Image (cartoon, rainbow, N blue to C red):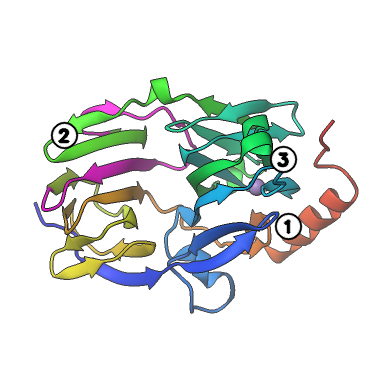
Amino acid sequence: MSAKPVASLVRGLPTQDGNRVPLTRLVPGYGQHGTEAFRAMDPFLLMDHFGPMVLSPGTDAGFPPHPHRGFQTLTYLIQGAFRHRDSTGGSGLLRPGGAQLMTAGSGIVHEEMPVPEHLSTGGAIEGVQLWINLPRTDKGSPPGYTDLQPESMPWQLIPGGRLRALAGTWAGTAGPARTPARIAYAHLELDAAARFRHPLPAGWTAAVVPLHGSVRIQDTTVPADTVALLGEGDSLELEALSPASVMLLAGQPIGEPIVHYGPFVMNTREEIEQAILDFQSGRMGHLD
Ligand code: MN
């Protein structure tokens, strides 16, 4: 088995989105022109690491209603809580260790806002939102969302740490997220000097993103809030240089054209123009 080397290392960009939510935006294609940036991690588009931050009492920090079309979001909460509502009538509460898979498909409007506890007392919040592309044949599928409760993806103890499988099979355990794109996604926590190894199908994209702490992949050190996009090989191998919290991503590339504009990810410019028109005319629905 040959271990995948680091092909490129891209630091996340500290920014804000929604109502003043600080986050680190991780797009491995930053620096490339236009929408080519979103092709680098195919079938994944980008990852936002929001927080860790402490919301103040009375806060309206969060993500008020906005649309999406053409992809899926998988939002995983590490600390705190978020309440989700969307235009299909879906609603749910995100808790630590839980996640929510939202299929924007043909179009959805959603919001993610603080829960009453944060409004009265404030509190810490941290999580990761991953954008997963949909193949052309699924971009027009009905929108919807699925709560993935913490109980459906418990921590698995592994040598030197623990792992939570969100999608695909890791350490013998399958994660609950189902996506048209073939993916594997996990949260790994390792003690300093612990090693982790996992086989991956040939030809799959793979990336390692430390949220806290740093890891080494062969001779390359990967610091926190950095995407390490891996090259050819059939296994993912890393060593923690400190206590580390790391997201692991792998997936089969979709290999189709990507045209991205704000909250929409389609295959052609015409489809983006149509998405803007459909949102502006209310055809992606609204929140009650
Ligand atoms: Mn959103």
Which residue shows up at 57% across the image and 62% down it? Answer: 258
Among the 4 quarters of the image, the one containing residue 11: bottom left
Which residue is denoted by mark 1 in the rendering?
A: 271
Give the percent coordinates (x, y) of residue 215: 21, 59
Tag of residue 110: 3
The amino acid type, in three-letter code, at marker 1 is Glu
Query: Residue 141 versus residue 242: which sits nearer the camera?
Result: 242
The answer to whether any part of residue 174 appears in the image is yes
Label 3 is placed on what type of residue? His
In this rendered view, identify the residue nearer to me: 211 or 10: 211
Residue 176 point in image, percent of width and height: 41, 27
Q: Amino acid at mark 2?
A: Ile
User: For this rendering, which residue is in front, 240 or 283?
Assistant: 240
User: Residue beneath label 2, please?
Assistant: 158
Place of residue 188 in the rendered image (x, y in percent of width and height, measured from the top left): 28, 43
Q: Earlier in the sequence, mark 3 or mark 2?
A: 3
For marks 1 and 3, the one nearer the N-term is 3
Residue plotted at (42% across, 25% down): 150
For the residue carrying disc 2, how many other residues have a C-alpha within 10 Å: few (<14), some (14-19), or many (20+)? few
* Residue furthest to the top: 151
Q: Which residues are magenta?
A: 170-194
Please state, as top left, top right, bottom left or bottom right, where the C terminus lies in the image: top right
Q: Residues within 10 Å of mark 1 (few under 14, many from 20)?
A: some
Q: Position of residue 24 (x, y in %)?
A: 50, 61
Q: Which mark is residue 59?
A: none
**Residue nearest the viewer, comparing 189 with 258:** 189
Judged from the image, the secondary structure of the residue bearing numbered disc 3 is strand
